[in-house]
Amino acid sequence: MFFDQKNSIKICIHRKSMYLSSMYSKELLKGTLSAIILKLLEEKGKMYGYQITQLVKELSDDKILLKEGSLYPALHKLRDDGLIDVVTENIGNRVRHYYSLTPEGIKVKNEKEAELLDFIFTINKIITS
């Protein structure tokens, strides 16, 4: 959940289908997934994929259920764009890939968050007028 103090609104992001639960169309979340990932990495420092899916599920009250088929391509794109770093660690017999923001990722996160909050505020104005 994001809280936009400037506009005094609470914003919950939900999702459906291939990368969302059954509440919302995938089109609503498709453009916001990278912003969600960047925001969580900013808050937590570093995370591995499963942690991201579980935190999104928890924060959205089970309304956004990220699937591997949407999460990992998004993470790979963010890495390829230089917005996140990946560190591999061996935990027992498991290999974990920990993701964290780069300095450019922090900048882009701030831009995406501001854009998303403004967009939600604008849509809210339209549908409640």
Image (spheres, grey):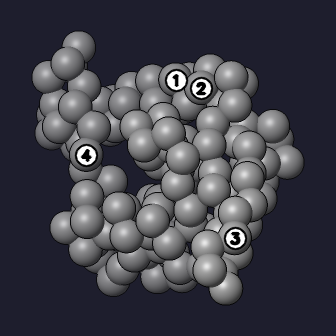
Does label 4 or label 2 sit earlier along the sequence? 4
Does residue 71 appear to the left or right of 77 in the view shown? left
Residue lying furthest top in this view? Answer: 6
Q: Three-letter amino acid code at disc 2? A: Ile
Q: Position of residue 90 (x, y in %)?
A: 69, 70
Does label 2 or label 3 sit earlier along the sequence? 3
Q: Which residue matches tag 4?
A: 1
- Report the mark closest to the observer, 4 or 2: 2
Identify the residue at horizontal 52%, vertical 23% (top origin): 110
Residue lying furthest front in this view? Answer: 92
Does residue 53 appear to the left or right of 86 in the view shown? left
Q: Three-letter amino acid code at disc 1? A: Asn
Q: Nearer the viewer, residue 66 or 42?
A: 42
SS assignment at label 1: helix
Q: Which residue matches tag 1?
A: 110
Q: Residues within 10 Å of mark 2 (few under 14, many from 20)?
A: some
Q: CA distance from mark 3 to mark 4?
A: 32 Å
Quadrant (top left/top right/bottom left/bottom right) for the C terminus: top left
- Report the mark closest to the observer, 2 or 3: 3
Q: Which residue matches tag 2?
A: 106
Does label 1 or label 4 sit earlier along the sequence? 4
SS assignment at label 3: strand
Does residue 93 appear to the left or right of 10 in the view shown? right
Does label 1 or label 3 sit earlier along the sequence? 3
Does residue 64 appear to the left or right of 1 in the view shown? right
* Residue 90: mark in rendering: 3
